[in-house]
Image: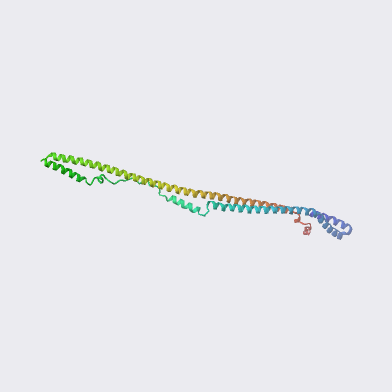
C-alpha cells in the first residue's frame, strides 16, 4: 500500500514540475500521493476483510474450546462426587479403615501355651469308709478266733494281714479307676474349652480381617476412581492450555499479516 502511494506521489510531482515548476511539483506530488493511496488501498482492504473474517472464525473456535473445557471439567468434577458417594457415602471410610486396622493389631489370638494340668492324687479317691471296712473285717476275724480259742495264735495274725491286704488292694484299684475317670473327664472338658477359645480367636481374626479387607478395598477403589477423574481434569487443563497457545499464536500471525494495521497515510509520519 505504501508503494502505490509513493509511486503516485512521484508521478504527480514530475507532471506538476513540467507545468508549474517547484510549486506545481509540490501540488502534483500531494495529489499523486492521495490518488495512489486511494487506488492502492482497495486490494489491501480486501485482504484486511479476509483476515478479520478469519479472526472471527478463530474467536468462534476459542469460544468452542472454552465451552468444551467448562463442560468437560463439570463432568469430571461430577465424577469425583459420584466416586465419593459410591465408595464413601458417609465420609467415614478412612476412619473405619483405621479402626479396623487398630482392632486387627489388638487381637490377642489363641494362647497355645495353656497346657492341661491335674492336681488331684489317688488319695482324693479313697472311700471314706475304707478304714471302717478294715476295722469291721478285723473284728470279725478276731471274734471268730476268740470263739475258737485261737485269739492270739499266729494263724489269727496271718488271716488279719491277708484280709487287710485284700481290702487295701481293692480300695487302691477302686481309687485308681475313679481318679482315671475323673482325670479323663476334666481333660475332655479342658480340651472342649480350649477348642472353643481357639475357634473364637480364629473367628475374631477372620471377622477383623474381612472388615479390614473390605475397608481397604473400598479405599483402593475410591482412590483409583478419584485418580482417574483427577487425571481427566489434568488432561482437560493441559489440552486447554495447548489449544489456547495455538489460538494466540494463530491470532498473532493473522494480525501481523493485516495490511490495515499500516494505512497509506502513515507515510506522513516519515516527515
| Residue at (59% x, 53% y) in the render | 78
Q: Nearer the viewer, residue 1 or 57?
A: 57
Q: Is residue 104 left or right of residue 151?
A: right
| Residue at (42% x, 47% y) in the render | 203
Q: Is residue 182 left or right of residue 45?
A: left
Q: Position of residue 35 (x, y in %)?
A: 83, 57
Q: Is residue 271 left or right of residue 81?
A: right
Q: Position of residue 159 (x, y in %)?
A: 16, 39
Q: Of all residues shown, which one is farthest toward the bottom?
A: 23
User: In which quadrant of the rendered view does residue 74 lie?
Assistant: bottom right
Could one spot residue 112 in this view of the protein?
A: no
Q: Of all residues shown, which one is farthest toward the left?
A: 149
Could one spot residue 38 in this view of the protein?
A: yes
User: In which quadrant of the rendered view does residue 144 lie?
Assistant: top left
Q: Of all residues shown, which one is farthest toward the right?
A: 19
Q: Is residue 53 left or right of residue 186?
A: right
Q: Nearer the viewer, residue 52 or 176?
A: 176
The count of marks equals 0
Q: Position of residue 261 (x, y in %)?
A: 75, 56
Q: Nearer the viewer, residue 57 or 7?
A: 57
Asked which colour scheme the image uses, the reply is rainbow
| Residue at (44% x, 51% y) in the render | 103
Q: Could you tell me which quadrant the C terminus lies in? A: bottom right
Q: Position of residue 37 (x, y in %)?
A: 81, 56
Q: Could you tell me which quadrant the N terminus lies in? A: bottom right
| Residue at (45% x, 48% y) in the render | 207
Q: Nearer the viewer, residue 159 or 214?
A: 159
Amino acid at each position: 500500500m505504501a508503494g502505490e502511494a509513493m509511486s503516485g506521489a512521484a508521478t504527480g510531482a514530475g507532471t506538476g514540475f513540467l507545468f508549474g515548476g517547484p510549486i506545481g511539483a509540490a501540488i502534483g506530488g500531494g495529489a499523486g500521493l492521495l490518488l495512489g493511496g486511494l487506488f492502492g488501498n482497495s486490494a489491501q482492504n480486501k485482504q484486511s476483510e479476509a483476515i478479520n473474517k478469519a479472526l472471527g472464525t478463530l474467536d468462534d473456535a476459542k469460544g468452542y474450546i472454552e465451552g468444551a473445557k467448562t463442560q468437560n471439567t463439570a463432568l469430571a468434577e461430577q465424577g469425583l462426587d459420584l466416586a465419593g458417594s459410591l465408595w464413601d457415602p458417609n465420609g467415614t471410610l478412612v476412619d473405619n479403615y483405621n479402626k479396623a486396622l487398630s482392632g486387627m493389631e489388638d487381637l490377642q489370638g489363641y494362647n497355645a501355651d495353656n497346657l492341661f494340668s491335674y492336681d488331684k492324687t489317688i488319695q482324693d479317691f479313697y472311700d471314706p469308709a475304707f478304714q471302717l471296712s478294715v476295722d469291721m473285717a478285723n473284728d470279725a476275724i478276731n471274734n471268730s478266733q476268740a470263739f475258737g480259742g485261737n485269739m492270739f495264735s499266729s494263724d489269727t495274725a496271718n488271716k488279719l494281714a491277708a484280709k487287710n491286704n485284700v481290702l487295701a488292694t481293692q480300695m487302691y484299684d477302686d481309687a485308681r479307676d475313679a481318679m482315671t475317670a475323673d482325670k479323663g473327664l476334666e481333660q475332655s472338658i479342658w480340651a472342649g474349652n480350649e477348642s472353643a477359645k481357639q475357634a473364637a480367636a480364629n473367628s475374631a481374626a477372620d471377622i477383623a480381617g474381612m472388615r479390614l479387607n473390605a475397608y481397604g478395598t473400598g479405599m483402593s477403589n475410591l482412590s483409583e476412581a478419584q485418580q482417574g477423574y483427577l487425571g481427566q481434569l489434568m488432561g482437560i487443563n493441559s489440552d486447554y492450555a495447548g489449544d489456547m497457545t495455538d489460538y494466540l499464536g494463530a491470532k498473532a500471525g493473522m494480525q501481523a499479516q493485516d495490511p490495515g494495521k499500516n494505512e497509506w497515510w502513515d507515510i506522513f509520519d516519515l516527515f
